[in-house]
Amino acid sequence: PKRDTPAVLMNVFNKRGLDGARWSLASPKPAGVRGVAGVLGVRYRQLASGDFNHTSALILLDRDGRIVTRTEKIGSVVDPEFLAAVRKAVRPC
């Protein structure tokens, strides 16, 4: 929460050209970080430098905040199962 301020998140939003009808970026209050991390299955630890080491994951939530799908396969190769689940979730009805 100290780094992921509304201004920083807005910069990411604009830089990535995200669609506000489909994307929301948020950062919990400091007291809520542990709970959010637990619900999302994100492990983290603070390093001596003050930086954080954490799980790298892509997590798709539905409108009610429930996990639709997730992957920890990050890199140049797309996780085909994650991509299929995202496409299914965002296709028009």
Image (spheres, rainbow, N blue to C red):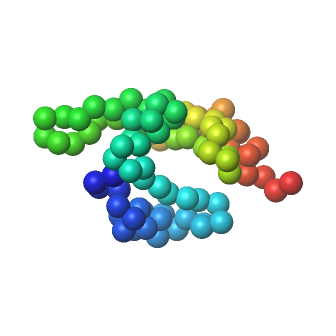
Residue 85 vs residue 37: left or right? right
Residue 69 vs residue 16: left or right? right
Q: Residue drawn at (29%, 35%), measured in percent from left and top?
A: 53
Q: Residue drawn at (39%, 65%), measured in percent from left and top?
A: 6
Q: Is residue 65 visible?
A: yes
Q: In terms of depth relative to the viewer, which is nearer, 21 or 6? A: 6
Name the image quarter holding the C terminus.
bottom right
Residue 89 vs residue 26: left or right? right
**Number of marks:** 0
Q: Is residue 15 visible?
A: no
Query: Which quadrant of the figure has residue 24?
Result: bottom right
Q: Residue drawn at (82%, 56%), measured in percent from left and top?
A: 92
Q: Where is residue 22 in the image (x, y as percent from the top left)?
A: 64, 60
> In the image as oriented, which residue stretches furthest toward the right?
93
Q: Where is residue 63 in the image (x, y as percent from the top left)?
A: 68, 51
> In the image as oriented, which residue stretches furthest toward the front?
31
Tell me: residue 29, above or below residue 39.
below
Q: Residue drawn at (52%, 33%), measured in percent from left and top?
A: 39
Q: Where is residue 11 in the image (x, y as percent from the top left)?
A: 39, 68
Q: Position of residue 55 (x, y in %)?
A: 39, 33
